[in-house]
Image (cartoon, rainbow, N blue to C red):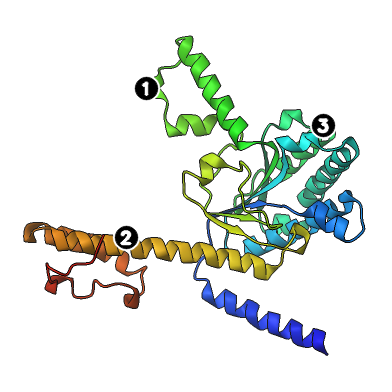
């Protein structure tokens, strides 16, 4: 009886969260932490925790598709993971290869037109994993509804260092003019390939750090970050909705700040500049609730009491 009541309450809460969310981020990146601790607490081997985590990955992919997320990047295997014990590492490689092939064959992946891509130093992976990558990418190469990026042998700092060194070598050899180095030039050289800016990073397992994950795409875009306690195998749809709510709250706060700063600017400018400033503020009115701005009577401002910047 108590279990049914708890399930009903959580169901109501989940629907409430869905109503609170007015839109989804374009690109979500996930640090899937806690598989081994989950296994240990359940008296199982680490490989069973990774397998349980793979089941969560399948569910998250479905949630992203349902909510309109265009790109999902999963931190499946970092460059630091090469230091794990041989047995665990090899079992993890087996699971990655198995799941890549399994995903590529799933009818729902094709129904949802999911494109699977591996990012990272994939040449460092065993041949069986590289073969599975080639299989999954080939089977989904024509799709573009939802991109699933699987970060394998990936390290953000090492990636940026490698690009920097390559550019420096070419510049020293006279093959590249430093003045020609652009954002597009750097992005073409990244192992992540054509990846959109990250809007939201989620980390499970309780740790509050982003572990060198997609620094170019996340930090440059000032991505929202959501840390949560559940281990990756325990991550639920409610947790996912909470993360998206955090992203939406951050976006709304950013918009409010822009409006408030614009209002302060109007308080400082001359009448000649007022029309242009009011036009700029008007661009934000559609995305900010009226009760959250102080700009309704902007033409009747009191120059001595304008909002602070």
Location of mark 3 (residue): 126
Q: Nearer the viewer, residue 137 or 257?
A: 257
Compared to 301, does 199 lie above or below? above
- Callout 1: helix, strand or loop? helix
Compared to 265, does 86 lie above or below? above
Residue placed at 26% from the left, 73% from the top?
Answer: 294
Location of mark 2 (residue): 258
Location of mark 1 (residue): 179
Marks 3 and 2, the one that precedes in the sequence? 3
Marks 1 and 3, the one that precedes in the sequence? 3
Callout 2 environment at 10 Å: few (<14), some (14 to 19), or many (20+)? some
Residue 138 location, quadrant: top right
Residue 196 is at least partly visible in this image: no
Quarter of the picture containing the C terminus is bottom left
Which residue appears farthest toward the top when viewing the image? 173
Marks 1 and 2, the one that precedes in the sequence? 1
Determine the CA span between mark 1 and mark 3. Answer: 39 Å
Q: Nearer the viewer, residue 87 or 16?
A: 87
Quarter of the picture containing the N terminus is bottom right
Q: In this view, does 184 lie to the left or right of 155?
A: left
Compared to 44, does 120 lie above or below? above
Q: Is residue 37 left or right of residue 230?
A: right
Report x, y in % for residue 229.
69, 62
């Amino acid at each position: 009886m108590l279990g049914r009541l708890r399930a009903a309450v959580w169901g109501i809460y989940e629907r409430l969260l869905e109503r609170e969310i007015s839109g989804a981020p374009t690109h979500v990146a996930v640090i899937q932490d806690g598989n081994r601790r989950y296994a240990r607490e359940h008296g199982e081997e680490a490989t069973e925790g990774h397998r349980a985590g793979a089941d969560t990955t399948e569910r998250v992919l479905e949630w992203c598709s349902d909510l309109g997320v265009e790109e999902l990047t999963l931190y499946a295997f970092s460059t630091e993971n090469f230091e794990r014990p041989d047995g665990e590492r090899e079992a993890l490689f087996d699971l990655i290869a198995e799941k890549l092939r399994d995903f590529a064959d799933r009818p729902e992946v094709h129904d949802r037109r999911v494109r699977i891509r591996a990012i990272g130093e994939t040449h460092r992976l065993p041949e069986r994993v590289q073969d599975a990558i080639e299989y999954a990418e080939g089977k989904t190469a024509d799709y573009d509804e939802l991109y699933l990026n699987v970060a394998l042998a990936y390290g953000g700092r090492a990636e940026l260092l490698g690009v920097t060194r390559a550019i420096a070598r070419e510049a020293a050899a006279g093959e590249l003019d430093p003045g020609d180095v652009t954002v597009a030039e750097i992005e073409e050289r990244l192992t992540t390939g054509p990846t959109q800016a990250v809007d939201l990073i989620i980390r499970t397992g309780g740790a509050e750090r982003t572990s060198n994950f997609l620094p170019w795409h996340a930090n440059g875009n000032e991505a929202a970050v959501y840390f949560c306690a559940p281990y990756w195998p325990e991550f639920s749809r409610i947790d996912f909705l909470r993360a998206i709510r955090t992203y939406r709250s951050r976006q709304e706060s950013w918009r409010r700040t822009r409006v408030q700063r614009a209002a302060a600017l109007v308080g400082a400018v001359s009448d000649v500049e007022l029309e242009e400033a009011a036009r700029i503020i008007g661009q934000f009115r559609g995305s900010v609730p009226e009760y959250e701005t102080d700009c309704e009577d902007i033409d009747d401002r009191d120059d001595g009491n304008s909002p602070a910047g």
